[in-house]
Amino acid sequence: MAALTIALKVLLVLSSFFLIMTVLLHKGNGGGLSDMFGGGLSNAVGSSGVAERNLNRITIGVALVWAVAIVGLGLMIKFA
């Protein structure tokens, strides 16, 4: 049980980091956090619809992994 808990905690930390990074990579709709990291360049580079769709898919996948890690840790804590 201890190894599974540690694995879920590591998975949670990694998925949290990647979820933050993928959300920050999304194209912004105007001034905001996404424009803080070079807004003019991101508008020219991130204008591809295919790239944005792939980033959406990756973000959803990472969010699902994050949610599974949260639920798994919650169940481990409840039934420990």
Image (spheres, rainbow, N blue to C red):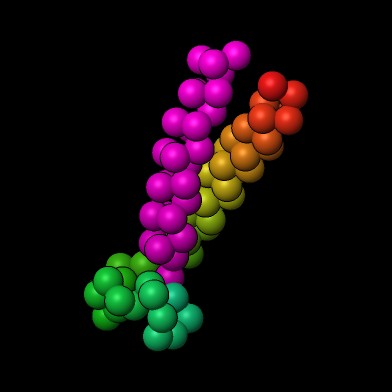
The secondary structure that dominates the magenta segment is helix
Q: Could you tell me which residue is drawn at 43 percent across and 55 percent down?
A: 20
- With 53 as the anchor, is 77 left or right in this view? right
Q: Residue at x 47, y 51 (%)?
A: 19
Residue 48 visible in rendering: no
16 drawn magenta = yes
* Residue 21 place in picture, x, y as percent: 39, 55
Specify start and end residues of the magenta stretch as a single range.
1-27
Return the residue nearer the eye: 61 or 7. Answer: 7
Q: Residue 66, image x and y in percent?
A: 57, 42
> Magenta stretch: residue 18 in it?
yes
Q: In this view, does 55 lie above or below 12?
A: below
Identify which residue is drawn at 44% across, 76% down: 28
44 lies above or below 68: below
Picture quarter with the C terminus: top right
Count of labels shown? Answer: 0
Q: What percent of the width, then of the height, locates residue 67?
A: 63, 42
* Vertical side of 3 occupied by 56: above or below: below
Q: Is residue 52 visible?
A: yes
Percent coordinates x, y for residue 22 in the rendering: 43, 55
Toward the bottom, the furthest residue is: 31
Q: Viewer-proximal residue, 70 or 47?
A: 70
- Residue at 48 percent across and 81 percent down: it is 29
Which picture quadrant has residue 75?
top right
